[in-house]
Structures are given as C-alpha cells and as structure tokens.
Image (cartoon, coloured by chain):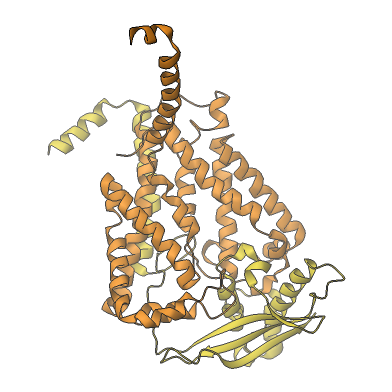
C-alpha cells in the first residue's frame, strides 16, 4: 500500500523541501525587513526570542542573512547533500521563518502540514536515494523497507488528521449551525471585500443566489473531510478523495480569495513514486524492445 | 492474540538496528501526535502546535464586519488601489490580519511589549487612551516606501501619500457592503 523504497522517500524530500526553497527565492525579504518590528506579536515559541533579536532581524542586513541561510540550507536539503544535517537546519530555519510570518499576521494553516513533514523528514533516512549523497556513495545501504515506508505512512496520517480533525472541530464549535445556508456566502463575501487578500475575485457575490443549495455543498465537504483518512488505507478510494481535495482547494480561490497551495502540494505523499518510477522505466524499455524487434533480422526472418 | 504474538515474535527476531529504528519512529510519532491531540482537544494554536480550526465558526450573516482598502495617491493626482500582496508577498494570506491586528492595537496587549510600544503606552497613559491603529502610520510608511522603491524616480505613478480606508458591511442582508468608517493617511 505504502511505497517502501529509499527512492520514494527521497522524492518526497525533494518535493517538500523544494516547495520551501521556491518560497524562499520568491519571497521579498527586503520588503519584509521594511515592516516595523513594533507591529509584531510573537506567537508560540517565538515569544522566547527577545525584542532586540527582532530589532536586529527587521533590517536589510538581518533579512539578507536569513534569506541566504534559508536558500543555502534548503538548496542542500532539496538536492540531498549532507542530508542528515541539512534537513535539520532547513527544519529549524523554516520553523523560525514561518513563526515570524505568523507573528505579523495570523496563524495561517496552509504551510503547517508541510512544516510537520519537514519534522518527519529531518529524522528519517530521506537522503538514501534521489540525492547527491547517494551519488557520492555516502548513504548507508542496509536498511529494512520499514525505514522508508513508515515515514511516508506517518506523513499520510498527518495529512489525514488535518482534514479529519478540521471537520470534527467545525462540528464541535458550530454544530449543525455550520450547515446554515448563509455560512458560506457570508464568509466568502467578507473575504472578497478588501484588497488585502492575495487575489481579488468577486465570485462570492454570486453565492447568495444559490444559497438554498449551499448547505448540501458544505455538508458534502464536511463528509469528505471526515472520510479523508480512508485515502490512507484504500487505494481505489484514494484518488477520488484526492481529486475532490484538488477541486475544493482550487475552488476556494475564486470563491473566497483563500488558497491552500502548500497543503495541496503535500498530496505528493500519496503518489506511489515506486510505481511511477517502474512505469517510466517500462516506457523507456518498451520502445527499445519494439525497435529491436522491428530491426533485428533474425526476428524478422522468424516472423 | 495472533497479531500480538506475531509482533512479539518479530520483535524477538529483530536485530538491534531494527529495534532502534522502531523505537526512534515510535518516539517521532508520539512527539508529533501528542501535541496535535492536545491542540485538537483545546482548540488552540500554540505555534508550531496546530489545531486545524480553519473557518470553524462559519459565516454569520447577522454579524457586521469591517474591512480595509489600501489606496495610494500618485504624484499625478490619481487615487489607485494598491494590492498588499504585491508589496509584502512573503506575508501571503496574512496581510489582512496584520492590518486588523494593527488597527486593534494588539501589539500593545502583549505580556512583553516592544520597548518603543512600551514608551508610547507610557506617553498615552493606558491602552484605553491609545487611538485605534496607533501603529498604522508606521505600517503605511513601510508600504509606501516599498511601493515607491519599485517605481522609477521620474514615474508619475510614484505615491505622494498612502492611505487605508476602513469600511463596514453592516450585514443582516446581502447589500450595503461599503459604509465608510474611517481612514488613516500617511504623507510620503
């Protein structure tokens, strides 16, 4: 059920670290440095850091140092070089950076599952394949399949927990009121009024026209979230559940101006990378076989 | 019983390296899931421990809501909408809550205050005396600087002032979304 090779775990490492690498390159740290530290509200573990540290960080020099450290560390961990160390330094740096962003704004959940995946990858042999370490022969070869299968299973369970617990919390906090016809349109319109969100779609204003159907839609999504753990255990259901997730997360962008791209990309832990690798290799072998079959005079003579 | 005996048998036959790996993975699993269960039960986020309470309360049509539009006044005299994500893209999805928290003076409600906020609070006497959005001018100054830095010196699109206009959707019905409340303006 779960891929159990160093290759599969290596590909997941490449994806998860690669996404944060992409963010680090694309984010304007110099703009972030311009924001005044006086509007910061350190959250969770960030409260342990002194204000003098944030004052030093919220400068062009401070942010340039942070960006350089992050890009170098994530580049190494994505490529799988010095993986045992680089996955841990990347985890610490991303944890700090995401905490900083949440200290300016709110506890956005999008990247959190990817941060949890970084924790898993930091303490598992994710550099044993699909890595520079492997090319250089620095990896330990003898490990049981369990060493690679369990981390992938753990990441799948974490992703399932995200949806399952989210549905339970909604039911606990809002109860049946969550299925009110005004729940979705009121929320969606609120998120479409300002110009401080990432996008400025106006589809939300169309929702009141179909408000009587929306409880069914919201109920369907709640059930989908509750059933998400089945994706871990049933291969046939998996793709249906994941495709609903893809459509749902894409739909929230035009409807609510809220996206969960990082969480969506974490679906990569459900891809059977071993099988994909096998299929890719088969496709490479097949044309050679066909060509040989066509061109080999003995085969032609026999036929 | 057979599963337990199988597990016991496997454990007995496993080598030391495998046993160490199993223990390590068990600790990793517990270290991840125990805080998550706590956050779930308490419905509380304590970074990095996460409760997935996204949109848990849902929307309530009866509740009024305030929101802000960021605008710039250009040198050529135009008033333009400025998208916050284009200024501080790193904050992605968090710009609007940063503004709300700053308007609500939440940085002055912390246990440990920034020294400059502490000084400002002393100057005003108490948090009740602080005007709403006491630090909004600083935020607007920063956004204005970021915007102008990206425009050529000669560009008529450079900003001479930047402002945050606050509106309220009184709610109760799907109309009247833009009742003007107040504005913060910063000359650049």
Which residue is at a point 62% across and 81% down the rendered structure image?
B69
Which residue is at a point 80% across and 79% down the rendered structure image?
B188
**Residue that extends furthest to the left in the rendered view of this protein:** B1
Which quadrant of the view contains residue A102? Answer: bottom right
What is the letter of the yellow chain? B
Which quadrant of the view contains residue A54? Answer: bottom right
| Residue A296 horizontal/vertical position (percent) | 43, 10
* In the foreground, A302 or A142: A302
* Quadrant into which the C terminus of chain A falls: top left
Q: Is residue A273 left or right of residue B140?
A: left
* In the foreground, A112 or A244: A244
* Quadrant into which the N terminus of chain A falls: top left
Q: Is residue A234 visible?
A: no
| Residue A178 horizontal/vertical position (percent) | 31, 77
Chain A in the picture: what colour?
orange
| Residue A56 horizontal/vertical position (percent) | 73, 62
Which residue is at a point 36% across and 28% down the rendered structure image?
A144
Which quadrant of the view contains residue A211? Answer: bottom left
Q: Is residue A301 left or right of residue A127?
A: left
**Residue that extends furthest to the right in the rendered view of this protein:** B154
């Amino acid at each position: 059920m779960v891929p159990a090779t160093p290759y599969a775990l290596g590909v997941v490492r490449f994806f998860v670290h690669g996404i944060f690498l992409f963010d680090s390159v694309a984010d304007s740290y110099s703009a972030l440095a311009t924001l005044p530290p006086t509007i910061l509200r350190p959250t969770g573990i960030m409260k342990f850091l002194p204000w003098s540290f944030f004052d030093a960080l919220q400068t062009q020099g401070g942010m340039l140092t942070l960006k350089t450290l992050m890009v170098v560390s994530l580049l190494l961990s994505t490529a799988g070089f010095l993986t045992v160390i680089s996955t841990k330094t990347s985890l610490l740096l991303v944890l700090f950076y995401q905490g900083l962003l949440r200290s300016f704004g709110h506890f956005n959940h999008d990247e959190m599952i990817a941060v949890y995946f970084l924790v898993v990858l930091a303490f598992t042999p994710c550099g044993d394949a699909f890595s520079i370490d492997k090319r250089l022969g620095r990896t330990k070869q003898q490990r049981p399949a369990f060493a690679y299968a369990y981390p992938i299973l753990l990441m799948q369970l974490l992703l399932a927990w995200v949806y399952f617990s989210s549905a339970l919390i909604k039911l606990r906090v809002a109860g049946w009121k969550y299925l009110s016809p005004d729940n979705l349109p009121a929320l969606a319109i609120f998120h479409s009024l300002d110009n401080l969100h990432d996008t400025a779609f106006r589809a939300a204003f169309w929702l009141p026209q179909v408000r009587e159907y929306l409880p069914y839609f919201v109920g369907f999504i709640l059930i989908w979230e509750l059933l998400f753990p089945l994706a871990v255990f049933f291969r046939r259901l998996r793709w249906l559940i994941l495709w609903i997730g893809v459509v749902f997360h894409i739909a929230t962008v035009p409807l609510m101006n809220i996206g969960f791209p990082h969480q969506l990309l974490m679906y990569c832990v459900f891809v059977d990378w071993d099988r994909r690798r096998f299929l890719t290799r088969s496709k490479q072998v097949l044309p050679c076989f066909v060509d040989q079959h066509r061109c080999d005079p003995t085969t032609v003579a026999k036929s | 019983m057979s599963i337990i005996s199988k597990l016991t048998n496997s454990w007995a036959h496993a080598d030391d390296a495998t046993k160490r790996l199993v223990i390590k993975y068990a600790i990793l699993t517990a270290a991840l899931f125990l805080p998550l269960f706590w956050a779930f039960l308490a419905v509380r986020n304590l970074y990095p421990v996460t409760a997935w309470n996204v949109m848990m309360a849902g929307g309530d049509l009866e509740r009024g809501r305030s929101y802000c539009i960021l605008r710039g006044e250009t040198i050529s005299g135009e008033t333009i909408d400025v998208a916050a994500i284009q200024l501080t893209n790193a904050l992605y999805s968090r710009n609007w809550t940063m503004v709300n928290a700053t308007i609500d003076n939440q940085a002055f409600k912390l246990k440990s205050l920034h020294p400059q906020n502490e000084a400002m609070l002393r100057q005003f006497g108490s948090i009740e005396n602080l005007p709403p959005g006491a630090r909004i001018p600083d935020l607007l100054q920063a956004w204005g600087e970021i915007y102008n830095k990206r425009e050529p010196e000669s560009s008529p699109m450079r900003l001479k002032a930047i402002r945050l206009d606050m509106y309220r959707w009184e709610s109760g019905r799907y109309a009247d979304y833009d009742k003007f409340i107040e504005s913060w303006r910063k000359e650049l």
